[in-house]
Amino acid sequence: MGSRQEKEKAVNVQVILRCRPFNDDELRTKAPQVVTCDESNREVSVTQSIAGKPMDRVFTFDKVFGPNSKQKDLYNQAVIPIVNEVLEGFNCTIFAYGQTGTGKTYTMEGECRRTKAGSHGQLPPDAGVIPRAVKQIFDTLESQNAEYSVKVTFLELYNEEITDLLAPEELSKIALEERQKKPLPLMEDGKGGVLVKGLEEEIVTNCDEIFTLLERGSAKRRTAETLLNKQSSRSHSLFSITIHIKEATPEGEELIKCGKLNLVDLAGSENISRSGARDGRAREAGEINKSLLTLGRVITALVEHLGHIPYRDSKLTRLLRDSLGGRTKTCIIATVSPSVHCLEETLSTLDYAHRAKSIKNRPEVNQKMMKSALIKDLYSEIDRLKVEVYAAREKVGVYIPKDRYDKEEAERKAMTEQIEQMGTTIETHQKEIEDLKEKYNSQLENCGDLTKRLEATEKTLDHTTRLLSSTKEELKQAHYNIKEKDFIISKQIKAENALTNQACVLRSDLEKSTRENASLFSKIGIENVVRLHKSTTNASLEEMASVDFTNHSSLKQMVAGGLEIASNILIDMEKMLSSHRADIASFMKELRERFQASVARTKETSILMV
Ligand SMILES: Nc1ncnc2c1ncn2[C@@H]1O[C@H](COP(=O)(O)OP(=O)(O)OP(=O)(O)O)[C@@H](O)[C@H]1O
């Protein structure tokens, strides 16, 4: 018990559906039945006529009790386990929710307000949840021979004012009315809960005492009903039973286990739809029943997991905050009528109850208290009460005129309301701050992501910029190269043209030279011939000189003469040749000069081409 595992366990609110039998009016008017209960399948079907055709809507609940079900059936099946948990030290709440006249009070209190437990401790068959729970509690505690204390409170909430239904009867009628009207303030208990200041806590020791108190409270409620028109359908009642049970640890230490059972009879649910607040679209809060409207909004907020749960917007939800999404085990008994006349409200109740099924509570067993600590608390409470009693008896307290007291009370009330409003505003602001924090955090996350992306983009940009500048440089270089190549190409074209011209000139020069060479070679051929003749002649002459011409002296002379002539001719030819040689030399010189000029021009062109 009380382990971490237990703390973490979420439990859905248990929702039970009860359909009452037809009442006399409905039987007399033979009102058609539109609700059918299938208890074994835990289903309720509602027959509607849509466009002239009957259509069934089926709802499933944790338990379903049809018109024939008895008080005992509902109690045994649905409530006994809850009361057992209260005796184990849990806080549990049972709500009755439904349209006026569908059996909320019948289910919670039953028809035994004035009928106490029989002589054998038996309850009448019509006894509701409260008397049966009380009986179970006392029976269990007695059977365990436990040391215990049972305290009850009974309050009514109407028009956002809390009235104590167990306030002691005053002697004078004026005092009674005063007391009945006097609303009790709801205050924070400093431990995260609330307490109703001045609410009477009655200690009871047996069932009968509780029934007397229940009767007293209900009577007060009925009295008020006559004063305020139809109050019962617009007021909520909360009957709470707190049990303290003494336990001993194996070491002999005394511990006090505490459990609390809240039994809530809510106002008629039709008040919600009348103010247009169905499906959580609450408007006009406070106009008809602020507490019932807020209960709807709280359920919607819990079911839809909204961040802000408007518990503080009404007294009922402040009182029962722990029962809705808190550490209390909660059960809702939704009541409906089977008749067609209530169809709309029945569907509304079923929708509402079905939604409430999704609420999750995290029930936690109450911490056991050391008996010594509890006694200490009780002693300080006794001391406080003693001071109050002494002040009242000795009249040593503060006494002020009644009109001033009323005025101050009114001011105090206004201030309390103001404080409550401020509390609500603070809660709203806190919620806003939380929302903003969440937004801020998500923005921070986004910002972080964006920064990372920006950094990555900056890196890419940097890289791209560098790439761009190097590409620009390369482009510039390429442009320059293209220009250079264009220039070289144009120069080459020029040079080629020049070379072509030069080649033409050279070609014509070569042709001319070839021609001149040819004539020169023909001339050289002549010289060679002459030289050949001369050598031939000289050889002949030498040959002739070596021959014996004695016998032929005239021939010798003639030949000598011929040789002389020939020699002269040769001399002439030599002269002629030597004159030609000069021509050839000058021609060769010219040719060389021309060649050198051509070579020079060619070099120039080659330089240009490079
Ligand atoms: N399950 C039931 N079996 C028999 N009678 C029932 C049942 N439920 C309700 N009734 C009868 O119907 C009538 C109206 O019931 P009850 O006063 O409990 O309604 P209610 O929902 O509490 O109404 P209100 O919101 O006005 O207080 C009573 O006379 C009651 O006895």
Image (cartoon, helix red, strand yellow):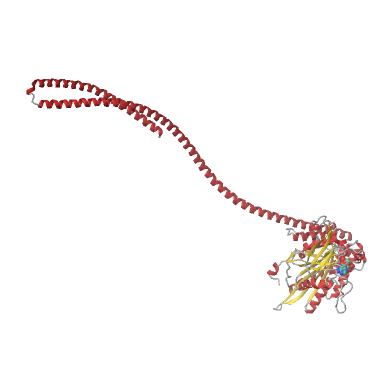
**Which image quarter is the C terminus in?**
top left
Residue name at image x 36 percent, y 31 percent: 602
Numbered circles on residues, count: 0
500 versus 382 height, above or below: above
Viewer-side residue, 303 vs 142 = 303
372 versus 309 height, above or below: below
For the question of whether residue 92 can be seen, the reply is yes
For the question of whether residue 167 can be seen, the reply is no
* Residue farthest to the front, as pictured: 551
Q: Is residue 152 left or right of residue 542?
A: right
Where residue 31 sits in the image (x, y, percent)? 89, 63
Viewer-side residue, 472 vs 588 = 588
Viewer-side residue, 397 vs 200 = 200
Where residue 188 sits in the image (x, y, percent)? 77, 63
Q: State which quadrant residue 529 falls in.
A: top left
Q: State which quadrant residue 544 falls in.
A: top left
Q: State which quadrant residue 182 falls in.
A: bottom right
Query: If the picture is divided into quarters, which one holds ligand 1?
Result: bottom right
Where residue 438 sits in the image (x, y, percent)? 68, 55
Where residue 163 sits in the image (x, y, percent)? 85, 64
58 versus 203 height, above or below: above
312 versus 214 height, above or below: above
Residue name at image x 40 percent, y 30 percent: 500
**Which image quarter is the N terminus in?**
bottom right
